[in-house]
Amino acid sequence: MPAVPETSSRKSPVKKTTQFRRLLNSPDLEFLCEAHNGLSARIVEEAGFRGVWASGLSIAAQFGVRDNNEASWTQVLDVVEFMADATSVPILLDGDTGYGNFNNLQRLVRKLEQRGAAAVCIEDKLFPKTNSFIDGKRQPLADMAEFCGKIKAGKDAQSDPDFSIVARIEAFIAGWGLDEALRRAEAYHAAGADAVLIHSALSVPDEILAFAKAWDRRCPIVIVPTKYYATPTEVFRNHGISLVIWANQILRSAITAMQETARELHREESLVRVEQRVAGVSEVFRLQGAHELEAAERRYLPADRTPPAALVLAASRGEELGELTADRPKTMVRIGDQPLLGHIVAGFQAVGVKDITVVRGYAKATVNLPGPAYVDNDDHADTGELYSLALGLGSRDWGAEGLIVCYGDVLFRKYIPQLLLDAQDDLTVVVDTQWQDSVNRDRDVDYVRCSLPYSRLHYNRPVQLERVSGALPAADIHGEWMGFLRISAAALPALRAELAALLSDPAHRRAKLPLLLNRLADQGRVLRVIYTSGNWLDIDRLEDVVNAGGF
């Protein structure tokens, strides 16, 4: 993709009001393109336009209301401010009739200057206005003298001498003809208008060209060729037009794209085809200026909090995989393009967990991926998960953020460790609500009973772990423990002490982690439960290795 300008951080040394004056008075034909919010304004600038038309029709439409002053002028001002903040080029606001009389226009001009707009266009119709393309000939025009007074008032109110007022003439729209259009243009120019916008609802440019010829460049002419769009642009150049406004095409193209996408999502009930043709989320972040915030955070905020470390328990062989683990442990069996442990490490790294320690044992020389640190359980043949956990916890200082413990034989989506990164409790486990998928499978399953079953009705209520067992009655099962345990730094001393007490009994040397979890629950320790559904795979059998390729 070609490089694009960084619009929001690029500040022109020339004022936006001066930039717009230069566009009006340029010897070349210049162009503005419609935008209706900060995002579309930035897109318009990145496309190369030197100015933006803040369309009244488009701003009203993005609010979902009619172009009849149903969006208040303060709401329009708020949108213009976001557009001005997002761009470095001038904005000409479609100010309808000025939102009232001369007094309202004076306040509008002051507020537009404060919010970074370069110019306003007002039309000689009555407030509240109606869009020119909706039965224009039935729309009365403003009294010419009153409208001239409004222009004078606006010019008197501006504090920046380069702020521009464009007077929009609706004589052709109302069916009043060329003579009336010229009479009004002359009066508005004499009142101080910096340019005139001559409008037509015909599909050919005849009225516009007749006006331009008779006007003879007495001040800049602005046009909006929405209806006579087939006219070659060179015709406008040859007739002395100063500024062309593409007035609503950005909004209309967005509507078409959104309608097509919404219909397809409803029809397909899937994102697969849609994602191939829509902008990536990273492009949204870029247009929002996320990189600027990141730079500011590095400058103004203290260093980012260090994420917790990870401890992977991978000392066992995995005899149930037969010949696959004859010379390597289960964690080094290849799944796709890399060992199972490689997928585990990548899953943690994807959420920012870079400090990873692996407890290895069986065929430990083969457990040698670059990146993790290693702790050796040389008694792996006679010990179990609790012993490996105790070795891992005792191997180092785990820092202020504690650690995440997981088994070395699980595949998982990265959002699972992300859930644990956000956990605030001292001890947190992840429970899969799709426990029925494990029924009748030839493997040990760590079913759990919790203080509350999963329910959308109380998804935000805290849930605690009460029991972990492969022998729970079906009526008591609320899910399956997935082998993840988040331990805070504050909980580590008590956890180490409990492990030491358990392992002092020789009968517990081969014990698994559920023994520790049940002991903690029996003691009244809070083990917070995060419910999730699927998106992980426990590698227990040869069938799991085959299925892992699809996962």
Image (spheres, rainbow, N blue to C red):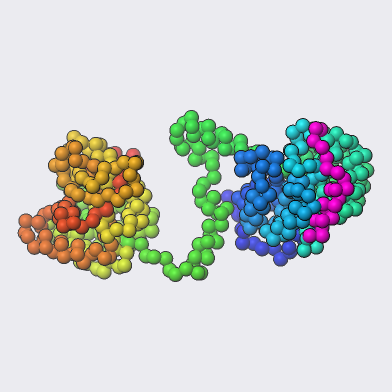
The answer to whether residue 453 is seen in the rendering is yes
In the image, residue 407 sits, relative to residue 480, either above or below, namely: below
> Foreground: 197 or 403?
197
In reply to whether residue 170 is colored magenta, the answer given is no
Where is residue 88 shown, x and y percent of the image?
67, 58
State the residue lying farthest toward the top. 267
> Foreground: 122 or 503?
122
Secondary structure predominantly adopted by residues drawn in magenta: helix
In the image, residue 353 sits, relative to residue 257, either above or below, namely: below
At a point 93% along the width and 39% down the height, the residue shown is 179
Q: How many marks?
A: 0
At a point 63% along the width and 39% down the height, the residue shown is 65
Where is residue 338 shown, x and y percent of the image?
32, 49
- 474 to the left or right of 2: left
Which image quarter: residue 436?
A: top left
In reply to whether residue 145 is colored magenta, the answer given is yes
Where is residue 453 shown, x and y percent of the image?
26, 42
Position of the C terminus, as image quadrant, is top left
The answer to whether residue 409 is seen in the rendering is no
Which image quarter: residue 320?
A: top left
At a point 61% along the width and 40% down the height, the residue shown is 64
**Magenta region, residue range:** 137-157
Which image quarter: residue 379?
A: bottom left
Where is residue 322 shown, x and y percent of the image?
17, 43
State the residue lying farthest toward the left. 506
- 289 to the left or right of 341: right
At a point 21% along the width and 41% down the height, the residue shown is 477
